Amino acid sequence: MSPDLHLWLLPIVPFAGFLVNGLVGRKLPKAFVTTVALVASLIPAIQVAGIVTKFGSLTLPHVENLGTWITAGAFHAGFAFQLDQLTLVMLCVVTGVGFLIHVYSVGYMVEEEGYWRFFAYMNLFLFFMLTLVLAENFLLMFVGWEGVGLASYLLIGFYFTRESAANAGKKAFIVNRIGDFGFLIAMFLLIAHFGSLSFSSVFSQITARPDWQGGFLTAIALFLVLGATGKSAQIPLYVWLPDAMEGPTPVSALIHAATMVTAGVYMVARTHVIFDRSPLALTVVATIGVATAFFAATIGILQTDIKRVLAYSTVSQLGYMFLGCGVAAYSAGIFHLVTHAFFKALLFLAAGSVIHALSGEQDMRVMGGLRTKIPVTFWTMTAAVFAISGVPPLAGFVSKDEILYQAFIAPNGGKIFWAVGLLTAGLTSFYMFRLWYMTFFGERRAPEAAQEDNHGAPVHARSDTKLTLEAEPHAHPVHESPWVMLGPLVILAILSVIGGFMGWPEALGGSNWFTHFLEPAVQTAHLSYEQTSVAIATGAAHAVPAPTPAGNHHLELMLALTSTLVAFLGWLFAHILYYAKPALPARLATQLHGLYSLVRNKYWVDEIYGALIVAPVLFIARWLLGVLIDRAVIDGGTLTAGYTAQGFGALVARIQSGNIRSYAGWLALFAAVLLAVSYFGLTAHFSLR
Amino acid sequence: MLTDHILTLITFVPTAGAIVVVLLPRKGRIVQAFTLLVTLVTFALSLHLPTHFDYANHGFQFEENVPWINSPAIRYHLGVDGLSLWLVLLTTFLGPVGALISWRAIQNRTKEFYFFFLIQQTAMIGVFVALDLFLYYGFWELSLVPMAILIALFGPNRGRQAAIKFFLYTFIPSALFLVAILYLYAKAGTFDFVQIQNRLASGSLGLTPQALSWLSLAFLVAFAVKVPVFPLHGWLVDVIQEAPTAMAMVVAGKLGLYSIFRFNLGLFPAQARAIAPLMIVLAVVGILYGALVALAQTDMKRLVAYSILGNLSFCTLGIFCFAVAGLNGAVYQTLNEGLTGSALLVLISMLFERFGTYDMSLYGGLASRVPWLATLFVVTTLALVGLPLFNGFVGEFLVLSGSFAGHPYWVGAATLGTILSATYMLSMVQRIFYRKESSLVLSRPAPDLGFREHLTLWPMAILMLAMGVLSPYWIRAIEPAMTPLSGATPAVAAPVTPTTAAARLSGGAQ
Amino acid sequence: MHLALFIVFAVLCVAGALNLLLQRHPINSALSLIVVMSSLAVLYLLLGAEFLAAAQVIVYSGAIMVLFTFVIMLLNAGKEERTHGSKLAYIAGFPGAAALLGLLSYIFLSRRGEFGQARLGEYLATTSDLSRVLFRDLLLPFEVTSVLILIAILGAVALARKEH
Amino acid sequence: MNDALRILPEIIFTLGGILVMLADAMMAKGSSRKPLGWLAVLAALAALGASFWQAQLPPGTAYYGVVRTDAFSVFFHVLIAGIVLATLLIVLDAVTPETEGLGELFALIQFGAIGMMLMSSAVELLLVFIALEISSISTYIMAGYRRKTAKSPESALKYFLLGSFATSFFLYGIALVFGATGTTRIDDIAAAVGKAVTGGPVSPLLTVGLAMIILGLGFKVSAAPFHVWTPDVYEGAPSPVVALMSTGPKAAAFAILLRIAYGALPALQDHWLPILWWLAVLSMTLGNLGALRQRNVKRMLAYSSIAHAGYILVAFTALSPDGIAAASFYAVSYAAMNVGVFAIISHTGGYDDHLTLIDDYRGLAYASPILAGAMAFFLISLIGIPFTGGFFGKFYVFSAALHSGMIWLTIIGLINSGIAAYYYLRVVAAIYSEPAGSAPVLSVTGPSFPLLLAVFLTAGTTLILGIAPGSVLSAARAAAQTYVAAPSSPAASPATTASR
Amino acid sequence: MVPIAYYLVLSAILFSIGVAAFLIKRNIISVFMSIELMLNAVNLAFIAFSRQWSQITGHLQVNGQIFVFFVMVVAAAEAAVGLAIIIAIFRARNTLNVDQIDLMKL
C-alpha cells in the first residue's frame, strides 16, 4: 500500500495560478502576478522533488483515482492519475524546465502589456501538460492533449494584433485538431474492442492475449501515430511548428521545444504495449521519424530567422525521438527527449537573450560579432550548440548515439534508418554551427539601421512600453540580459553538458542508468519479427530479454566514433562557409539555384497544402454547398413549391370571372353532373375509405 | 403539496405572467423587470424537480393525470422522466437569460414581445411535460405562434417572409402528424402516451406493419423538420437571422429531438430502426454540410445557424445508432446545444448592440477593447468545438464513441466534423477579436460587458464547465430513461390493464 | 279531349318560353312570359287545381308581371345588346341545361306507368279543401309568410328609396 | 299557448322587429337611429335567453308537427341568437347616425334571424323553404345596403339572382322528393324512403331530388363547386353584413342539410355520402387554393369560408353521432371566430371599406394593439392552432371522420389546413410588421364599446371552445343524439366497424 | 286521359328553358323573368305530383297544391325585392346589362 501522494495537486496548483492571474491579473501589479505565477510553477517542482525522494518506496504503477468523469452504460472513465518511471521522468522535465522558463520569462516579458495574460496562459499550459503526463487513461490524457493545444494556441497568438501571429495560432490549433481526430478514432476503437480506456485495463487485456498481432491493434496504433504526428510536428503535420515561432520566445522554449511537442513521443512510449504488437505501426513511426529528421534538417540549413532555424531543428530532433520509438527503443527516445529538453530549451532561451540584446532583431544575417558583447549568452549558447551537434561527451551526443545505435541493430531497414540518421546528424551540426558563427562571430553586419526592418518581433507588440528595471532598448543598442534571464541559461547549460551521463552507455564504461531505470515502464526493448513469432509460439512476448550489451560494445563504440566524426565534419563545413570564406555561400546559392530556392522555400509544402486541401475545401464549402445546394436546391425547392400552390390558386381564381352568366353556367353544369352522379351512382364503384 | 402540482405550476406561471404583462403600463422598464421576475420564479420552481427526482425509477414522475374532456377521451396528463427533466430545466434556465438579453435589444413593442416570450416558455415546457398526445400536440403547435409573430414583429429586414416560411415549414408536416395522432386515437381510443405505448408494445392495436411505418414516418417528418435534420433545414438560417435573440436561442433542437426520443423511439422502436440507416447518413451529411457551409460565411448569424445545424446532427446520429452511450450523448448534446448555442447567440447580439452589424469582416482587434467579452466568447467557442472539460466534449464523445462500434465508417466521417467546427469557430474568433482594430471598431465607443451582461453570461459559462466536468450528475437521470430505448422493443410492454381495455371500449363505442 | 287541350296549351307554354328566350326586348319577353303563365293556369285547371289556376292568373299574370312591366318602363330598358361577357355560359351552361332536360325527361318517361293517367274532372281541389289544410296543418308557415312579406316591403323601401 | 313556447325565440324577434319598425317610423327625421340598435340587442338577448330556456322543454313538435324543438334545434337557436347579437353590436359600431335605413337594417337582421332559426327547427319542407327564403331575401337586401357604392348593389344582385337560381333547383328537388314519397314531412319521408329502400331499387326521383336539394343547400353554405358567388358577394357587401351572412344562414343551412341527410334520407346514404365526400374535398381544396393569391382581405376570407364549409362537410361523412356533433360544434367555433374577424375588419376597414387590401392592414398593431391582438387571435384560430375553438373544431371533425375510416379525406383535409395557414399568416404578419410611413391604418381609432362587447363575446367563445369545450361538446352530442337512429343504416356499420 | 308524366316532362322542359334563358339573357330584368319561369315549371311539377298522389292514395291530396300557393307568395316577395335591387343597381351603375356588372372578379 503506497502512500497518497496527492498527485492531483500537481496540475491543480498551476490551474489555481491560472485562475488568479486570468480573472484578476489585469488589475494587479506585476510583482503580484509574478509571484503568483512563479509560486504556481514552483510548488509542483518541489512536489515532484518530494516524490522523487519517496519514489523507491512506491509500488508502481502508483494510481490515484478522483472519481468518474464520463460514464455511459458499462463504460466509465475517471479522473485517474498514475505515476511510474516514465511519468516521473516527464514530471521532472515539465516542472523543472517549466519553472526555469517561468523565471526567465519574468525578465523577458517584463515590458509586455499582456504580462498577466502571458503568465496565466503559461500556468494553464503547465496544468494541462501535467494532466497529460499524469493521466491513467486515454481520455484524461486527451484532456491534457487538447489542453496543451489550447494553451499553445493562446500563447502563439499572444501578439494577437499581428495578423501573422493570430494565423499561426489558428493554424497550430487546427493542424493539431487533425491529429486529435486520429486520437479520437483510436479511442473509439479502443472502447469498441476493450470497453475501457484505462491504460492498465487495456494493456493487461492485450498482454493476456499474445495471439493478438497487428490487425485492429495496427489500426489503433496508426491512428495514435496520426495524433502523435500532429502534436509532435512530424510529417505530414509538422507545418504548424515553424509558424508557431510567432509566439514569445519563452513559449517557443517551453511549449514548442521542451515539453508539449514531445507529448507525441511520450504517448507512443506510454502505449508501447500496443505498438509492440504491430511491427507495421513501428516501421511507420520509424520511417516518419527519420524522414522528418532529415527533411527538417535540410530546411534548417538555409533559414535566416534564428528562431526558425531552431524550430526546424526541433522538428528534426523530434524525428530522432520518433526513430527511437520506431525501433522500439523507447527508453532511448525518452532519453533524447530529456536531453533535448535541456539543450533546445537552452538554445531558445539564449536566442531569446540574443533577440532581447538586439531589442527584437531575429534575422541572423544582420547579427554577428556578439561574442564579446553578450558573453554569458554566448557561452551558454555554445554549450547548447555543442550538445545538439553531438559533440562528446555532451548530452546530445549520448542520447542521439543511443538512438542511432538502436536503429542500427534494429531488424530490417535498420541500417537505412541509421544511415539517414547519421547524415542528419551531420546536417544538424552544420546548421547549428552556422547559426553559432553567424550570430557571434565576424563583424556586426548591420548597425542600428537594421533595427528598422526587424519583422514582427516583440518590440512591435509593445505599443505603449512602460520603462521599468529594464533599460530602454533603443537607448544603448546591444546589452547583456539581466540575471533573472541568464540564471536559467546557466543552469540549463550545465544540464546540457552533464545531462548525458545519466545514460552514459556501457560501451564507454558507463552504466546506462537511465535506460535501466525506464526498463520497467517501457519493457520489450527490442522485439524483432522472429522473436515476435517465437513469442507468439511461446505465448510470452515480454519474457524475451533485450540483447545483452556485451556482444555489441565494439559495434556501439564504432558507431559512436563515426557519428562524432560526422559531427565534426558538419562543424568544419560551417567553419569554412560562414567563418573562413563568408563569400562562398552566396556563390553556391547562385550555382545551385534550383535546389537552393527549393530548400529556401521549404519545398513549398505550405503552398502545396494550400492548393491541394484548403482551397478545394473552401471552394466546395462556398460554391458547391453554400450556393448550389443550399441556395439553389433547398431554398429554390421551397420557393418552387410555394409558387406551384399559388399557380393553382390563380387557376381557381380564373373561375371567378365576375360574370353572373358564367357563374350560372358553372352552376348548371355541376347541377347536371351532380344529378348524373346521383342518378347513376357512379361513385359506388370506388371506395372512399 | 408542491410535488403534486409542480409541473402545472412550472408550465403555467409564465402564462399567468404573460396575462399580467398585458395589463402592465407601458413605461420605464417595468415590463422587463416583471418578465425577468416571472422567469426567475419559474426557474426556481423547476429546481424542485432535480432535487425531488427519484433517480432510481425510470418511469414518469411528478405525474398529474386528470380527465380534461371525457369524449373524445382527452386527459390532462403531465409527467417527467430522466429525458424531459433536464430539458425542462434547460428551458426554464434560458428564460431569465432571454429576458436579460432582450432588456436593451427590445426597445419598442415591449409588451407584445414579453407577452409572446412568456407564452413561448409555456408552450415549450408544455411540450416536454405533456403525456397526453392531444395535450402534447397542443403545446407543440402553440410553440409556433409566438415565434412566428415575434419574428414578424422584430425581424430586421425580411421578418414577414421568415416568419411565414418558418411557420409553414413546421406546420404543414404537423398536419400529417395530427392525422397520425388521430389514427392512433381511432385505434386505441385514448390519447394517453403510456397506454398507447403499452398497447403498441403488446401489439394489441392490431395495426398492420405498413400502417405502423406510415404512422412513425408521419411523426418523424414533423420532428425532423423542427430539429432540423439535413435536407429539411431550409427555414433555419432565415429564422436565426430574423428572430430576436431570445427566440433564436430556443427555436431549433430540443423540441424536435425530444419528440423523436419520446415518440419515434418510445412508440415505434422497430420502425425507427428500419429507417435508422437513412437517418444516420443524413446526420453525418448534416454534420459535415453544416460545418463546411459555416466555414464559408461572413455573417455571424448565418455562421451560427449552420453550426447549429451541424451540432444538432450529432444528436440525430446518436439517436439512430441506438447505443446507450450514444443516446445519453444525444440527450447531453441536446442540452449542450441549447446552452452553448444560446450563449453564442447572446454574445453575438451583444456585439451587434455595440457595433450594429453581424458582418465579421467589419470587425477586428476587439480583444483589447472588450477583454471580458472576448474571454467569454472564446470560452463559448471552446465549449462549442468540444474541448475537453467543456460540456460539448462530453456530448460529442458519448455520441461518437457510443455509435462507433455500430457504424465505424459513418461515425469516423462524422468525427471529421470536430476538425471543421474548430476551423470555422476559430476563424470567427480571429476575425472579430484578433488582428488590428478595424475602422468600425475604432469608430464606435465599445464598453466592455456591463453588469447585466455579466449576469447573463457567467451562469452559462459556469454551467458549460460544470457540465463538462461533472457529467455523471446529469447522466444518472438520463441513462435510466435511455436504457429501455436502446432495446429493440420498449421495456414497458406491460399487458393491457383493465383500465386501458375499458378506454379501448369507450374509444370504440362510436 | 283532355289530351288535345294539354297538347295545345303545352305547346303554347313552350312557345311562350322559347319566345321569352329569343326576344331581345324585355317587354316582349315579359309578354311571352305572361302567355306561359296563363296557359299554365289552364293546365292547372286540367289537373284539377282550380284555385291555383285562378291564383296563377291573378298573382302571376296579374300582380307580378305588372310589376315587371312597370319596372321595365320605369328604367325604360331598351333592346338588350348581345354582349359577349361570358363564354362559360355557353360551353358549360347549355350542355348542363340540355343534360338536365334529357335526364329528367328520361326519368319521367321511363317510369311513365308509376305516375298514372290524369282523367279530366277527377280530384278537383276546391278552395275549402285547400283552406282546411292551409289554416290547420300549415298554419305556422302561413303566418310566417307574413314575415317574409314584411321583409320584402322593408327591402323594397330600403333599396329603392329615393336618394336625398 | 304551449305551441307558442316552442317558437318563443322567433316570436321575440318578430316582436322586436316590429317594435323597431314602429319606433323608426315615429322617431323624428334625422335623429340618430342607434337606440333602435340597442333595442334590437335587447331582443337578441331575450331570444338567446329564450333559446336556452327551450333546452328544458321536452322534445316535441308544435303546430301540427311543422316545427320541432329538441336538443338539435335548441343548439342552433342559441348559436343563431348569439350570431345575431354579435352582428347587431358590430353594426352599432360600424354605422354612423347618418347611415341611411338604419331602422330597417335592425329590423331586417331580426326578421332574418327568424328565418334562420326556423330553418333549424322546421320538420316540414314547406316551412324549411319559407324559412330559407326569409333568411336569404333578408341577406340579399342587406348585401346591397350600401347602395351608393358601385360594389354593394352588384353583390346584392349577384347574390339575389344566383340565389334564386339555386333556390329553384332546391324547390325542384323538394318537388321530386314529394313526388316520390307523397309527403313533405321529414319523418314521413324517412319512413317512406326506408320502406322504399328495403322494398327494392331506389326511385330515381328520390336520388335526383336529393341531388337537387344538396345543390340548393350547397349553394347556401357556399360549398364548391357551388361557391362561385361567395367571393364577389362578400367583397361587395358591408362587413357587418358579411359577418352575419357568412355564419348565420350557413349554420342554418347546415342544420337543414343535417336534418335532411340524417333525419329524412338516412336510407340514401350510399347516394349522398359520395356526393358530400366530393363536395368536401372540392370545397377545402378550391377554397384554400383560391385564397392563396387574394390581396383583398374580405375576398380572402370569402375563400376561406368556402374551405371551412368543406371542413364541416367532412364531418357529414363520418356517419356517426360524433360526426353530427362535430359538424354542429364546428359551426359554432367557425361562427365565433369568423364573426370576430369581421367585427374587427368592419371597424378597421370601416362601413365604407376604405381599407380593403391585406397590405392596408400593415402595422395595425401600432395603431391599436387590442384590435391587432384580437384579430391575430381569430386568425390563429382560423388556422387551427391548439387552445382555440378553430383547432378543437377541426380536431373533432377529423377525428370523427377518421373514426369511420375516412383516412384520405382526413389527410387531404389536414394538408389543406396546412396550406391555409399561409394566407391567414400573411395577415397576421402584416398586422405585426412596421406600417408604411403615413399609412391610413394608423388613423384607426380604438374600438368602441359595442365592438369591445362583440369582440369579447366572440373571442371569449373561441377561447373557451379551445380550452374547455366540454359543455358545448355535450350539447352538440345531445343534439346529435336526435339522429341516433341514423348510423344504424346498412352502409355505415361495415365501415365504422372496420375502423375499430 | 293524359299521362301525368307528360306534365312532368313539360315542367322539365320549361325548367330547362328557364335555365337556358338565365344563361342567354343580357338584360337583368329578363334574367329575373327566366327565374320566374323556372319557378313556374316547379309549380307545374308540384301540381302534377299532388295529382299523382291523389290517384295513388285514392283520395284528394292538396299538399302539393298548397306548396305551389306558397311558392307564389314567395315569388311575389322575391319580385318586389328583386326589382328593388335592380332599380338600385341601375341607379348605381346606370346599366341593366349583366355582362357589365362584373366589377368584382378573380
Image: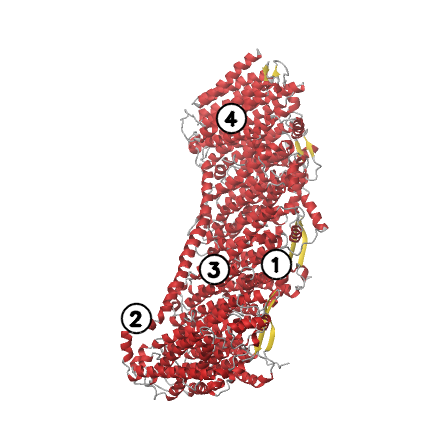
Mark 2 vs mark 1: give the one in front: 2
Residue type of the residue flagged with mark 1: Ser
Q: Chain of mark 1?
A: B
Please, what secondary structure does the residue beneath circle 2 have? helix
Q: Position of residue E59 (x, y in %)?
A: 67, 18
Using the numbered discs, state the Cα–Cα distance from disc 2 to disc 1 in whole angstroms: 63 Å
Q: Position of residue C90 (x, y in %)?
A: 45, 28
Which numbered disc covers residue B288?
3
Q: Chain of mark 2?
A: A
User: What residue does disc 2 label?
Assistant: A594
Q: Is residue D110 visible?
A: yes
Is there CB contact under 8 Å for labels 4 and 3?
A: no
The residue furthest top is: C1
Q: Chain of mark 3?
A: B
User: What residue does disc 1 label?
Assistant: B486
How many C-alpha atoms fall within 10 Å of the one at disc 1: few (<14), some, or many (≥20)?
many
Mark 4 vs mark 2: give the one in front: 2
Q: Position of residue A573 (x, y in %)?
A: 33, 82
Q: Residue at x 52, y 40 (%)?
A: D285
Is there CB contact under 8 Å for labels 2 and 3?
A: no
Residue type of the residue flagged with mark 4: Ala
Q: Is residue C58 visible?
A: no
Using the numbered discs, state the Cα–Cα distance from disc 2 to disc 3 in whole angstroms: 41 Å
How many C-alpha atoms fall within 10 Å of the one at disc 2: few (<14), some, or many (≥20)?
few
Which numbered disc covers residue C99?
4
Above or below residue D37? Residue A586 is: below
Front one among C29 and E82: C29
Same subunit, labels 4 and 3: the answer reads: no
Same subunit, labels 2 and 1: the answer reads: no
Q: Which circle's residue, 1 or 3, is located before the other in the chain?
A: 3
